[in-house]
Structures are given as structure tokens and as C-alpha cells.
Image (spheres, rainbow, N blue to C red):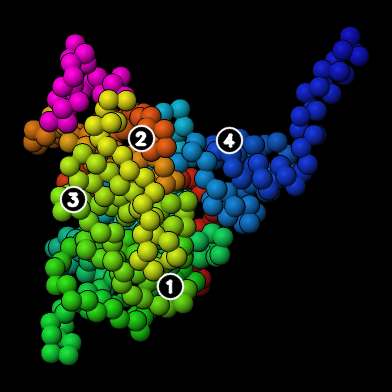
Amino acid sequence: MESRSKKARSHRAAPSSSVPDDVLRSNILPRLSFKSLARFKSVSRSWHALISGDPLFAADQSLHPTPASSGFVYHDSSGLGFLSAPDTPIGVPDPSYPSLSFTLHSHRLKLVASTNGLVCCGAGVPDFNRGAFPGFNLLYVFNPATEEAHLIPATQLDRLFVGLAFDPSDSPRRYTLVCLRRRHAVVEGYLKTQFRFHVFSSDTQRWVVSSQRVVVDDLRSCEPTAVFAGGILYWDCLHYLIWFDPSNNRAGWTPLPERQPSARQHRIGVWEGRVLTCTQTWNDEVEVFVMANGSSGNWVRRHWASFKTMVRRNPEVFARFCHPMRLRSESFCKRVLSRWFLRPLALDGGDKLYIGVRSRVWKSKRKERVLCCDLRTGEITSISDGVRLMSSQERVFCYHNSMVRMPRPSG
């Protein structure tokens, strides 16, 4: 009996002992899901120290997110929400955690940015002395996975055109917020739009005004959304991008991909954390472009897909949008697209496109179903049957769990 038990123990120990320790720590562990890593802390003291307190390990894990720890974050009528594919739940914050409870459940919120595991939100706090409830006068930067949060005064920011810059491979203990300020000004006798940049560093805990200015001819206004890719922040201004490099204090503008005449909308995103993407839709088609060479404006098409093809290839998914008996009809695809509006929400990893499906019949409390399409294979998975995005700020960002600890405020 003893020999059998010894053989059994040696057989169970063999797989772990056959993997070199450096390969296990550097190549395997950082690519596991966040929840798996949280459980593996109890394996040994060395693993606990590695997973809990090693900043290099945390940075590596943040830069190589596994699909099991990835999804997207959005703002609905009750606060912030997180979604991911079935059976791969991302670790969401504990609602009872004191420093996050207001941020997650307040309707006085605005989702501003999500970068490499950190999320930024604007919040409104009433001024009882003036009897006023301002739009947004505070910023929260927090890591939902580690349940850490920083509160940043933003009283001088009239509008939250804010981008969050955070690169765990370069500065795992520092993040930067950049607020885009714009105004119309007469330059060389012509009315133009001028952009300036207010910069907040977690190192100094202060806002400073950058010397950089960007002037464009376009006078049209929009509410630009910012993403961080390859060390540069980009704001989507509908017909062009304003960019700012916080590390080198450089700024400029670059065009978006050439739009089709019937293009309805577009969204910018990030591919593999480093490359800027632009997803365009028109009629029933979707194109995904990636920008080559930083802010050069050189766009390359990576994916093309048709909503009609998606419906035809995945009838079992779209059966819920139409009576099952009509699946046999050749007009099934046409019927679905005539009754339901499909639109891209977010692009994850450059290949997975989250799609919102909303009824074309207007309803006061309508919900949006969410699908995930693998653009390489065409396979579609149903993610959620009921997401109610805020009509005034339909901002959706990709999000993945990160083990990077929030930098400690100085002083």
C-alpha cells in the first residue's frame, strides 16, 4: 500500500516538476486568468509573494490578458457594468467595497476611459453652500480587480474630455490623466479650433498646462472619446484624431480612415494594447482598420465583415430575434436586419467584436442585446439579453483584469 501511495504522489508531482521554474513564473502564470491567479496564491509563500507583490509580474500579467479575464465596461442607468463571454467571467468589484461603492452605483457618473486594467470615471458631488449639483467635478481612477481607488479633484475641468494614459511595461507605478480643452480662436485672420492639454500625473498629484497646442480648421463640435495606444492618447473628433504623447510632451492631429459615403458611425479602440484601431459601419458592413507606425495616419484594413453574413452563418443565435418557423425562409436575414439595428460596441484584441442589437422600434426603456463575433471565424456568441446603456453617454470600453497595484499618492 505504501509503495502504491508513493507512486501516486510521485505521479501527481511529475507534471509540475517537469516545467522549469522560470518558464512557469514568466511564461505560464502571467497568462492565466485573474481568478486562477488569486487562487494560486495559496500554493506557497513564494507564489503568494510573486502574485501579490511583484510589480514586474503584475505588469507582465496586465500586458498579456487572457480571454478569461477580458470583456468590456459600460455605463447603464444603475452605474457601471462589466460584461464578458459566457464561462469566462471577469473579476468585477465587490459592491460593498467602501472606496468603490459610490463609483460603481451612482447615477451621477460618466465613464471616461479604460486603459490596461484601470478605469476612470467622472462624478458629480453637490455643493450645498451654493445649492447646486454640478455636472462633474471629481475624477475617480480605480482598479476594479484589486479594489483600489484614487479620488482626483477636477474642479477646473468644465467638460470631461479626459484620456487615461497607463503603460504597466514602462511605468507600472504611474498613470497620467490628460484633459483636452478646446476653444474657437482667430488664427492668422481665420476662425479655427484650438486644442490645449491639461496634464495630471499620479507622481506629483498636480494639474499642469502643457505648452503644446493643436489648431485645426474644423469648427464642428463633438464630445471626443479618448483611448491610449502605443504610449499615445487619441481623441476621436468625428473627422480626425487629436493626439498627445504625455511622455514626450508632443501633440498633433491625424486623419481617420477614408469613410464610405454611406458610413453611419465609427469607433476607435486598441488592438493588443499597442495599436490604434478604427471600426466603421455603413449599410450592413463592418470594416476594422489598424494604424501603422504610431500617429502617422497610415491605416491598414485588418477585417471586413457583413451583418448579413453573420446572420446567415449563425441562425441559432439570431433565432431569438425572429420566429423559429421563419428560419426556413430565405428572407430570414432581411427580416432580422429590418427589425433590429446592429452596431459595434467595442473591439477586443483586434479580432473579437462586441455587437449591440437594438429594436428599430423606439421604446422608452429599451434594452440592448449584446453579441460577440470572432472576426476570424465568423462565430457569434450571445453575451447578454439585457443591457440598458445611458442614452446620453453610450461609452463602451474594453476592460481586462489587471494585478497592477495603484500608485500611492505622494505626500
Q: CA distance from mark 4 to mark 3?
A: 42 Å
Give the magenta range: 314-338
Q: Main secondary structure of the magenta part?
A: helix
In the rendered structure, which amino acid carries the disc numbered 2?
Cys
Identify which amino acid the numbered label 1 is placed on: Pro
> Could you tell me if residue 392 is visible in this image?
no
- Distance between the Cα atoms at labels 3 and 1? 32 Å
Pointer 2 or 1: first along the chain: 1
Residue 36 has which mark? 4
Q: Would you call the spot at circle 1 few (<14 residues within 10 Å), some (14-19), or many (20 or more)? A: many
- Please give the residue where the numbered disc 1 appears in the rendered image: 246
Q: Say which residue appears at 42% left-offset and 72% top-offset.
A: 245
Q: Residue at x 59, y 52 (%)?
A: 60
Residue 120 part of the magenta segment? no
Name which quarter of the figure residue 342 lies in: top left
Under tag 1, what secondary structure?
A: loop
Marks 2 and 3 sit apart, C-alpha to C-alpha, by 20 Å
Q: Mark 2 or mark 3, which has the lower sequence index?
A: 3
Numbered mark located on residue 373 in the image: 2
Secondary structure, mark 2, is strand
* Dot placed on the residue nearer the N-terminal end, 4 or 2: 4
- In screen coordinates, is 280 left or right of 220? right
Which mark is nearer the camera, 2 or 1?
Answer: 2
- Horizontal side of residue 306 vs 381, given as left or right: left
What's the distance in space between the residues labelled 1 and 4, CA to CA? Answer: 34 Å
Q: Is residue 375 visible?
A: yes
Label 3 sits on what residue type? Answer: Ala
